[in-house]
Amino acid sequence: MTGPFATLTRNIAASRTARRRARNLRRSWTISLGPAWAWAALALVMGGAVALALHARALPNDAQDVPGTQALAALQPLAPGLEIVVPADSGVSLTQRGALALVIASGMQAGPAVRVDLCTQMLDPANGRLLPLRVGYPFGEAAVLARSSNGPPRSVLLARDGSSMPRIDITGNAGGGMAIAWNAGFETASWISDATGGVATHARQGQAALGSTSWLLWRGEALRFTRQPSGACPQAGELVLQHFQHGEQKAAAALVQAFPASGAPVSLRLRPGVWTVPLVAGAGLEDQALFEALRARGLLRLGRDGLIELAPRDLLVWLQADESVRAPLPGWQHFQLDAGDRRLLERLHYRADGAFVREQVRVFNSERRLVAWRVRPGATAVWQAAVAGSPAVREAGLPLAAMRLFAQLPQDWAPWNRVGGWEGGRRDSLVILNLSLSTRAEGKPLELLVAGRVRSVLGATVTARGVCDGRACPDAGAVAHLLLSPLPGATSVKVEIEPLDLARLSGGADAAYRHLKVERGVLAWQALPAGSRSVQPAGAAVRLVDRNGDALWQDGAPSVQATLAGLAPLLGVHRQHDGSVAGMLARLGGSDHAASLTLDLTLQARAQVLLDCIGQQGGQWDGRACHGAQPAPAERRAGLVLLDAGTGDILAAASSGGNTAAPDNWAEVRDFDRADPARSPLRIAAFQHDGGAHRAPGSTFKVITALGLEQAARGDKQLDALLGGLPLAQVDRIAGAGGYDFRTDAPSYPAGGTRARITNFRDQITGARAADGRLGLAGAMAHSVNTWFAWTGELSDRTLLGQPDGGLPGAAALEPGALDAARPVAAMAARLGFGQPLRLDGGLLPPDYRWGDWDALSASASQLDPVHSRHELRQMAIGLRMQTTPLQMALVAASVGEGRSVTPRLLLALDGRDAASSQGAPLGVRLDRVRAGMKGVIDYGTAAGAFRSPAFAALRPGLYGKTGTAPVGNDDLATVWFMGYLEPGSLPGQTRRLAFAAFVSHSALTGGGHAAPVVAALLASMAGQSLEKRHK
């Protein structure tokens, strides 16, 4: 084909390819725009102007979002033409397809990942031999093994009684391979691993090598094994196990994992149907092919400074020129270009696929080094940046990874500017920020926030303060706050800045939203999934009202009253806030949506004011204003929930602390939320937590411990007698007879020795608060006696095998409920909601609704940290080593008051449909002793001071509570709590039981001294006001 027709054909093909690449560039961030913007958007795309603007705006989930045809391309080199049938029904299969083994898990429910630190399995770290890891044994069998062996196993992962899970033993060496042996009884189990050369094994009893990724399948269920590096155990790493069972719903996309004869397994997600792997590489791989060819020929390479270097477009001309007239081009002077190299250079610099590769290189380089700056709003100073003596490309905003330099967003600053191109400077190049003093008013100091290491300042005196405080900070000096005072006669101010190595600060994890990454020091190309969400600012309109019809959200924004009541992070900060309640309903699509929430706006506003005043700022409320407020620690967070115990309706959900999220700083808030979601200003402290130590409930968890003790006491007469209260001398005799070092005249447990121990608050003697010389559950709870709960928690736990030492404290459940009968406290926590996210939609969202990790209608799952030792079991009994929320603890209080589990809801009605009401299962244990203990907390215990005022005389008889103080670190600060419930009739017009919980982190006080006053002030403000109408 020659002449004009050939040229026209090539131009059409190139245009079509360019359009495809433009789609690829924006695939991970879809913006739905109204018709008025459609042609403008198209013009931008065709001009290539959106390439950078979109690349960093979405972090895709995982391979499940990759379209099927794109995902299959990953299998093309391994199995061209292979047909894959993905069933719609739930199931898991392992088939041998020639030299390839294929696992397909469709519609399976994945259980929580169970992690085993392999260093804990080493009896002698010197030789590295691992003790056998027992998996799939019911507790009874594991207990027999423990009693019959010389020493109990370090880790046992339990199956339920009657489970079909094979019994599994895993052995090996820390520095070498591991092996698995299984016994599936009369069933056949199937095994595949990346250590078996792509060959599956099917046997009732078998042995095989365990590699980095492995599967064991039996009777429609499966276990997935992943051995991976671990910072906690560099010598051996960790083993992660996950149990897959049949799911209740048909699969949206199946997990497919292919094990080739050599190399790493390939994972992808495919929807149900019949799929065929392409026989040849498709056009979609040509960008990657060009990248691979350029890298193989050295025309694209990773420099020593971590930046990608591309061969210049005029390299051939430069090489052919005389050395005397050539500009320096380090690293390329000895390069020899052949015909193939020249063709690749032409593609790189003059074709569409080359433009796409160059854009990916630019994005990669822009996020490997960081120098950024910002000024105060309204500042007239315009700083100019230069790299290696040349003006630098300036871009707005920070890369997502750079957000991890901050524990919270800097406030009251103009938007960031950053150096966006590093092609003109290498690692040793400093960035020079220059300000011409002719552009500013004389006599005013200059204020600057700089991300980068400030090395010198010329033309001004400087006061510098390191302010880097985020998770990625190597030290405070990585971000500096500068106050510059120009010197007399100076015409400019210059600030020399050393770039930050952003790749190192981000922990070496390459961004999932760009094609280029570094694997073990080598550049690699990765396929990108589609974005996990598409923002739809022109989607369905949403209107939200409270339970009384008061407006909360309309016309794309929260109402003024809702904003003042602290509800913006919950309802929505911006139209693009798709994890908010309004954003979640907009994601439903279709026509406009109208919804009512369970919130009472009046109560919400009151709760927010009181939480801010008393909880966050440590002030006092006189009924009209806050007095004595103090600046709060920057890290402090506080939350408060008030709910209807009968229906689970959330009446108020107040949160305090952290930065303010508002429409004017939305872009920065959004990026911070994506980079560090747990610390985001969009988090709702009332029912979301960050998984850290500052969310431990402390002694409020003793209510759950007490319920677990009551459960265990149903089959244990001695424990039942202890709960009822016994003379101190008899308590000591029981402990001594069992070999336990527990004494009522000691302030700690164990009372002697040097081992880790549990200590009472302020070293109080265990029996000091005994009533009439007797101590039982009610008194121990009223005075929050840590040692009593730690010891009785041990007595209730069958994993300890009835012994004062040893046992199986590190046993963990691999199947739900496998540990419930043996560990009643943890089982009771699970019954009350721990371990699972709480959906607050009242059943109004469709079953196939796609939930996000931080959606506002999904409360964080409260979690118990894994228990590995007897001491950690004692800590669990008193509310340490766990994370929870005010919502969860309010539900616990409601359950005690109601005698049954309570299901929360925030969505009351949607588009004319009412939320479902749920009657939870009865707790089935004695409650009188638990309630008596919570009553004692109010009347004479740890919260008595907060409710001693005559103003509480009318409601005090119906008030039950529990305080909590969870120490964190060594700075004498704690997370403090108060939770409880109020009987009907305690307030005027109150016909429903109310439950509540509040917490304040980083407090120097106790739960009774800091958190209880927040609730006391709220209840006092409600007294004298009719609630009858409000609670309908």
Image: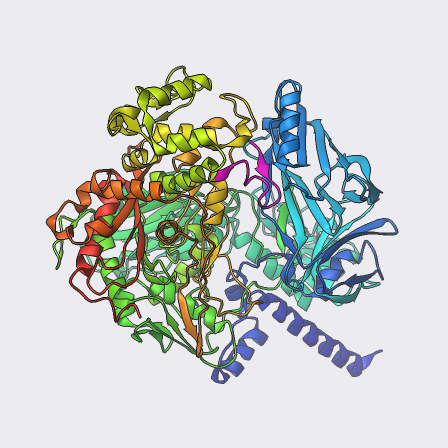
Tell me where residue 833 appears, x and y as whole percent: 46, 51
Is residue 865 something that shows in the picture? no
Tell me where residue 442 appears, x and y as whole percent: 19, 57
Q: Nearer the viewer, residue 165 or 506?
A: 165
Q: Nearer the viewer, residue 76 or 824?
A: 824
The part of the image, by quadrant, that contains residue 384 is bottom left
* 576 vs 658: above or below: below
The prevailing secondary structure element of the residues shown in magenta is: loop
Tell me where residue 319 appears, x and y as whole percent: 69, 53
**Residue 812 covered by magenta stretch:** yes
- Location of the N terminus by quadrant is bottom right
* 705 vs 735: above or below: below
Magenta-colored span:
810-824
Left or right: 283, with 151 as reference point: right
- Location of the C terminus by quadrant is bottom left
* 184 vs 320: above or below: above
